[in-house]
Image: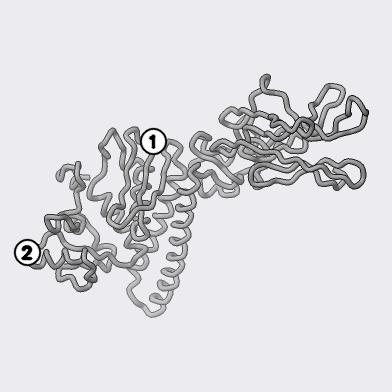
């Protein structure tokens, strides 16, 4: 508008700029209250006349973004008012009237996006696409449609804006921003490992070597990427990552099955991501406290996923009969390197990971080394049949 500065954003809202005459600029700070979806629910700031906080605008939305009408419609913005005594223009909060309708300068609302109402367009600009809140659909095809093959490329937030948000029109994500960042970090390290293994595969092929394990690892890593896509695509379950300490990594679901939490370390993140994928694909179904479908085959799958990244699986056997050897194994807890343990086991081929290996993996306890599987609460026969 006449190449004049009207406003600029700041971390807590925006700054309104009103020009008086040719040189005078009046600066007013407006602050915002946003909900967990990034929706701007309230704009407020000081009235220049009274120096008292006033609500500039209040917004309420239907889930897909259409704004509630017919209440809380009063909307003010910083502008120029006529002084009743001097008839001079002064800074103030201005309300529109039928005689003097206003073109609002600040139009950021649902999800914090800009409302485009020019020419009756009535859409939100999400950068990559335009969104119509009246029908809950995009007006442009999804630029990353191949990542969500089960969904129409025009859907918004997998038809579930209470669980997902699309920050830029590219792809819906979990509302839990921290978990999404963790998922992206895992995705990047998987991509980097795939690139390394593909280079190794080409080198082995040129030398007429055995490509079996390397090729299988690449396939398994691509499946781990599908785990992340499956979790993002699932409209019924919220998936969360939480960092934990060594020995406490696990994946569990809430009793209603609507939230799955993956507690991970740097050494178990892909393993637990595979369990998340299993929940997403309904291979494991939570009913109360019991994970139906969980068993040895699911652990074989998860250990293969982690092996595909690491290229090796080291574990201590729970089935040692020599007490002295078992005590030596327990000394690992005191800092003795794994390679010095007399009953260590090393897997160097992905196809060696099977049910027998899972049932042989040991964990340390006060009573020595015990079987890590099945976990407490899962009956052994059930575990080995699933």
Residue at the spot of label 1: 258
On screen, residue 293 above or below 310 = above
Residue located at (12% from left, 65% from top): 327
On screen, residue 5 above or below 82 = below
Front position among marks 2 and 1: 2
Residue located at (37% from left, 66% from top): 215
Q: Quadrant of the C terminus?
A: top left
Residue located at (93% from left, 28% from top): 87
Dot 2 lies on which element? helix
Residue 252, picture quadrant: top left
In the displayed orientation, state which residue is furthest to the bottom. Answer: 207
Q: Nearer the viewer, residue 142 or 5?
A: 5
Q: Where does the image place residue 85, in percent across and percent down from the top left?
A: 91, 25
In the rendered image, is residue 158 in sight?
A: yes
On screen, residue 100 above or below 104 = above
Residue at the spot of label 2: 323
Q: Nearer the viewer, residue 241 or 145?
A: 241
Q: Quadrant of the N terminus?
A: top right
Q: Where does the image place residue 28, in percent across and percent down from the top left?
A: 75, 40
Dot 1 lies on which element? loop
Separation of residues labelled 2 and 1 (CA atoms): 45 Å
Q: Where does the image place residue 140, in percent across and percent down from the top left?
A: 65, 42
Total marks in image: 2
In the rendered image, is residue 149 in sight?
A: no
> Around disc 1, counting alpha carbons within 10 Å, would you say few (fewer than 14), some (14 to 19), or many (20 or more)?
few
């Amino acid at each position: 508008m006449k190449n004049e500065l009207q406003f600029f954003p700041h971390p807590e809202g925006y700054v309104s700029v009103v020009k008086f005459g040719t040189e005078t600029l009046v600066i007013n700070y407006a602050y915002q209250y946003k909900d967990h979806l990034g929706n701007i629910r309230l704009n407020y700031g000081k009235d220049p006349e009274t120096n008292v906080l006033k609500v500039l605008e209040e917004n309420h939305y239907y889930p897909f973004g259409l704004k509630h009408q017919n209440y809380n419609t009063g909307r003010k913005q910083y502008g120029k008012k006529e002084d009743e005594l001097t008839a001079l223009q002064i800074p103030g909060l201005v309300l529109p009237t039928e005689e003097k309708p206003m073109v609002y300068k600040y139009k950021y609302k649902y999800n914090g996006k800009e409302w485009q109402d020019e020419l009756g367009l009535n859409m939100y600009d999400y950068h990559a696409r335009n969104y119509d809140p009246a029908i809950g659909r995009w007006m442009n095809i999804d630029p990353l449609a191949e990542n969500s093959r089960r969904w129409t490329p025009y859907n918004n937030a997998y038809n579930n804006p209470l669980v997902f948000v699309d920050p830029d029109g590219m792809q819906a994500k979990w509302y839990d921003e921290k978990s999404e960042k963790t998922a992206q970090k895992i995705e990047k390290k998987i991509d980097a490992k795939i690139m390394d293994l593909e280079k190794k595969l080409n080198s082995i092929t040129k030398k007429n070597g055995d490509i079996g394990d390397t090729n299988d690892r690449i396939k398994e890593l691509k499946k781990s990427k599908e785990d992340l896509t499956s979790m993002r695509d699932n409209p019924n379950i919220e998936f969360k990552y939480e960092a934990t300490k060594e020995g406490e990594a696990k994946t569990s679901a809430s009793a209603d099955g609507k939230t799955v939490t993956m507690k991970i370390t740097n050494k178990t993140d892909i393993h637990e991501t595979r369990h998340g994928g299993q929940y997403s694909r309904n291979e494991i179904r939570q009913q109360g406290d019991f994970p139906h479908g969980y068993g040895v085959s699911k652990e074989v799958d998860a250990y293969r996923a982690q092996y595909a990244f690491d290229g090796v699986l080291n574990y201590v056997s729970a089935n040692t009969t020599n007490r002295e050897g078992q005590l030596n194994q327990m000394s690992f807890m005191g800092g003795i390197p794994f390679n010095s343990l007399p009953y260590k086991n090393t897997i160097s081929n992905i196809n060696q990971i099977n049910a027998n290996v899972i049932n042989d993996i040991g964990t340390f306890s006060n009573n020595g080394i015990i079987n890590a599987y099945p976990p407490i609460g899962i009956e052994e026969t059930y575990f080995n049949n699933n």
